[in-house]
Amino acid sequence: KTQALAKLAIAVGARHEGAVHSHVRRSLEAGATIAECRHVALLATTTLGFPSMMAALSWVEDVAKKA
């Protein structure tokens, strides 16, 4: 679970939408909750800035809607 969330964080930092989608799904499969995936995106605020964090959060929500 921790590894999956770390990979999600890397995808968020790289701003790769498809990778974020994939790593959210993989994180959920590894036992993470959607709230934990959202938290990863929210933690990006101070490093990437608000607009980038909101983009990443919307990508997490894309997967949440389908889950």
Image (tube, rainbow, N blue to C red):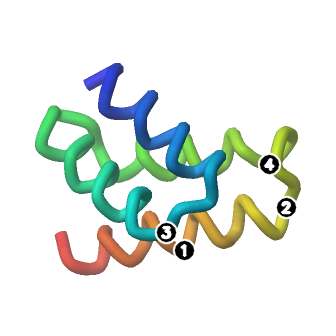
Disc number placed over residue 45 in the picture, else none: 4
Using the numbered discs, state the Cα–Cα distance from disc 4 to disc 2 in whole angstroms.
5 Å
Label annotation for residue 58: 1
Nearer-N-terminus badge (3/2)? 3
Quadrant of the image containing the C terminus: bottom left
Position of residue 30 relative to residue 29, above or below, is above
Is 35 on the left or on the right of 29, as rendered?
Answer: right
Q: Quadrant of residue 2?
A: top left
User: Residue at 45% across / 28% down in the picture?
Assistant: 6
Q: Earlier in the sequence, mark 4 or mark 3?
A: 3
Location of mark 3 (residue):
17
Compared with residue 33, is residue 31 higher up or lower down, i.e. above or below? above
Label 2, secondary structure: give it.
helix
- Which of pointers 1 and 2 lies earlier in the amino acid sequence? 2
Find out whether the residues at labels 4 and 2 contact each other: C-beta distance under 8 Å: yes
Real-space CA distance between mark 4 and mark 3, rounded to the nearest whole angstrom: 16 Å
Pick whichever, 12 or 29, lies toward us: 12
Q: Disc 3 and disc 2: Cα gap in Å?
A: 16 Å
Residue that mark 2 sits on: 50
Secondary structure type for disc 1: helix
